[in-house]
């Protein structure tokens, strides 16, 4: 939850952001309803309401599931993958931010 400044995002918020946009991409690929503008405003870089260790573990499980969902979209030749491929750069960018936040706190990088 640590932030380098009040107007910056935490590791957790960055993870929530990645999960949100992967879910958005899955909805597009599945032909489901996209999140509304209000959903985007509420969930993009969302601050967690529950900051317990178990809530963090659920967030990590959601991150893993969202990764598997993107893999499945890319593997399914019947699905359009342009948006899913965008996650390679998007997620790498935010992983870099997460690595920097960890380094600023004297923590080891995620490998």
Image (tube, helix red, strand yellow):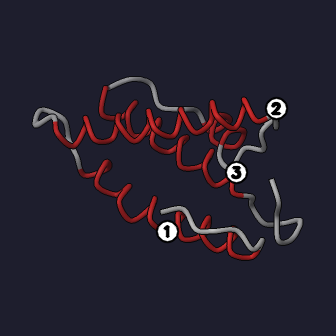
Report the residue that reaches farthest toward the top. Answer: 32
Lower position in the chain sequence, tag 3 or tag 1: 3
Tell me how far mark 3 sits from mark 2, CA to CA: 12 Å
Q: Nearer the viewer, residue 72 or 34?
A: 72
Label 2–label 1 contact, CB within 8 A: no
The mark tally for this picture is: 3
Tag 3 residue: 13
- Say if 81 sits above or below 53 in the image: below
Picture quadrant of residue 96: bottom right
- The CA span between labels 3 and 1 is 14 Å
92 on left or right of 52: left
Q: Residue at x 75, y 76 (%)?
A: 104
Front residue of 52/108: it is 108
Which residue is located at x 89 percent, y 65 percent? 6
Tag 3, which secondary structure?
A: helix
- Point 69% across, 38% down: residue: 56
Instruction: Check residue 25 in the rendering and tell me which mark sits there, or answer none.
Output: none
- State the image coordinates of residue 54 (x, y, percent, origin top left): 72, 29
Q: Secondary structure at mark 2?
A: loop
Callout 2 crowding tier (Cα within 10 Å): few <14, some 14–19, many ≥20: few
Q: Which mark is residue 50?
A: 2
The first of marks 3 and 2 along the sequence is: 3
On screen, residue 61 versus residue 58, left or right, reads left
Q: Which disc, if any, is residue 93?
A: 1
Where is residue 69 drawn, in percent x and y?
Answer: 35, 34
Q: Measured along the vertical axis of the image, is residue 1 above or below residue 68?
A: below
């Amino acid at each position: 939850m640590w932030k380098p400044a009040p107007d910056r995002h935490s590791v957790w918020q960055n993870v929530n952001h990645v999960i949100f946009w992967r879910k958005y991409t899955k909805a597009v690929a599945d032909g489901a309803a996209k999140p509304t503008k209000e959903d985007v405003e509420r969930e993009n870089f969302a601050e967690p309401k529950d900051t317990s260790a178990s809530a963090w573990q659920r967030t990590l499980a959601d991150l893993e599931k969202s990764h598997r969902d993107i893999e499945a979209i890319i593997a399914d030749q019947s699905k359009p993958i342009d948006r899913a491929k965008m996650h390679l750069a998007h997620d790498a960018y935010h992983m870099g931010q997460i690595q920097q936040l960890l380094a600023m706190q004297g923590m080891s990088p995620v490998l």
